Image: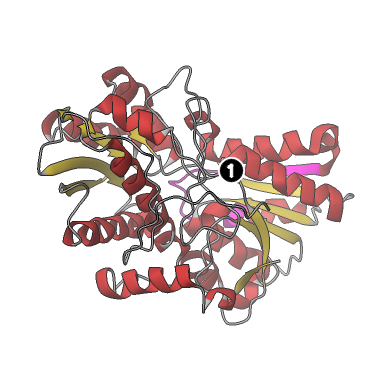
Amino acid sequence: MNRSRRQLLVAMGLGGMAVLVPGAARAEKKYDTGATDTEIKIGNTCFYSGPASSYGTIGRCETAFFKMINEQGGINGRKINFISYDDAYSPPKTVEQVRKLVESDEVLFMFNPLGTPTNTAVHKYLNAKKVPHVFVGTGATKWGDPEHFPWTIGFQPNYQSEGRIYAGYIIEQHPDAKIAVLYQNDDYGKDYVKGLKDGLGEKAKSMVVSEAPYETTDPTVDSQIVNLKASGADLFYNVAIPKFAAQAIRKVAELGWKPAHILNNVASSVGVTLKPAGLENSKGILSTFWLKDPTDPTWKDDAGFKQWVAFMDKYYPEGDKSDLNNVYPYTVSQTLIQVLKQCGDDLTRDNIMKQAVNLHDLELPMLLPGIRVNTSPTDFYPVKQMQMARFDGEGGDCSVR
């Protein structure tokens, strides 16, 4: 990848973030609801309970990150008031909590609310209210639609693109594969399946031999795995959140099924998926990465990794350092800090969006080398690159190959 970089002002703190500040002169102070001379009020919803509660660490890590920022003096002298509510991965609850954040707490904007079905439930509401819906915590393709939803922007690589990456790998390495697909029965799961089939093209009709959806209310996916194995498939495409992905990995091993196994990125954490599933059971699983895996010894002497460890040790010591879901919030929060710095004293909702779509070659300490954050008024997908990796099953390492 192109490793050239522009020489811009760089300020390094414990957060380890390279702050790129375009040459904007100080203007008069402008505020919308949720911003003052001393405070920036930010709203968030997260899964602190329910079937996806392993993701709750994302909200806790973000809370710790903003505590660090406040101790360092805040942003342009303003402290961050980060208000995060539990929606339990339940869309009706998300609607209730987001309305409370916007209409009662009067936040300036929503930052990194998690989940595809949950964000879908408030997508139209936030755009109608013209409340920035910034760096949503889901890779659904719909978050990159500035024409119809100009107040919503994603962050991570989108699921359809990821699915196409897997399709390219399958065509190259397993051209005669018989593919079995487990997927969550919502926009998140369907995006991944569409990406795979689009990437396979006409071959999808013959190569995909079995598909089994699951609901987040299902107790297990054991019956789906039994049926997928019975199809005679020799490649398993596992599109599930950590709880169900781990169940699937265990059941595949229990049945003695030995397919090539591709696991979606959202469940690729060693700490919350592969360890619970059993490291031996997880050996050989393929996935994609765009963040440095904290269990990979490749990064032990890496400056960015050391900065993240220092943050975790001081501000979130109870957090699991083997969990990628503690690398992700650190990285997306650093991106938000860049946006707020660019806003200067114009903390209006219009300017929050203007700066969110004005990020250029932003390098962050826990992004894989060569991967940068870029946005524009027509590009609402900040991170667009990924690398494939295979889990080696030894000591929890997942090395990019």
| Image coordinates for residue 395, horizontal then vertical, percent | 57, 82
Q: Is residue 355 magenta?
A: no
| Image coordinates for residue 107, horizontal then vertical, percent | 18, 35
Q: Tell me the amino acid under the disc marked 1.
A: Lys
| Image coordinates for residue 324, horizontal then vertical, percent | 47, 63
Viewer-side residue, 180 vs 242: 242
From the viewer's perspective, tell me whether residue 234 is left or right of residue 163: right
Residue at image point 18% right, 48% down = 80
Give the residue furthest to the right. 176
Seen in the picture, residue 372 relative to 17 is either above or below; the reply is above
Count of all numbered marks drawn on residues in the image: 1
Stretch in magenta: 208-224
Seen in the picture, residue 335 relative to 285 is either above or below; the reply is above
From the viewer's perspective, tell me whether residue 129 is left or right of residue 150: left
Q: How is the image coloured?
A: secondary structure
Give the residue furthest to the bottom. 395
Locate the C terminus by quadrant.
bottom right
Element type where label 1 sits in the image: loop
Residue to which mark 1 is pinned:
384
Residue 132 occupies quadrant: top left
Kindly tell me whether residue 174 is visible in this rendering: no
Viewer-side residue, 13 vs 111: 13
From the viewer's perspective, tell me whether residue 202 is left or right of residue 374: right
Kindly tell me whether residue 82 is visible in this rendering: yes
| Image coordinates for residue 353, horizontal then vertical, percent | 35, 29
Q: Residues within 10 Å of mark 1 (few under 14, many from 20)?
A: some
Q: Is residue 223 magenta?
A: yes
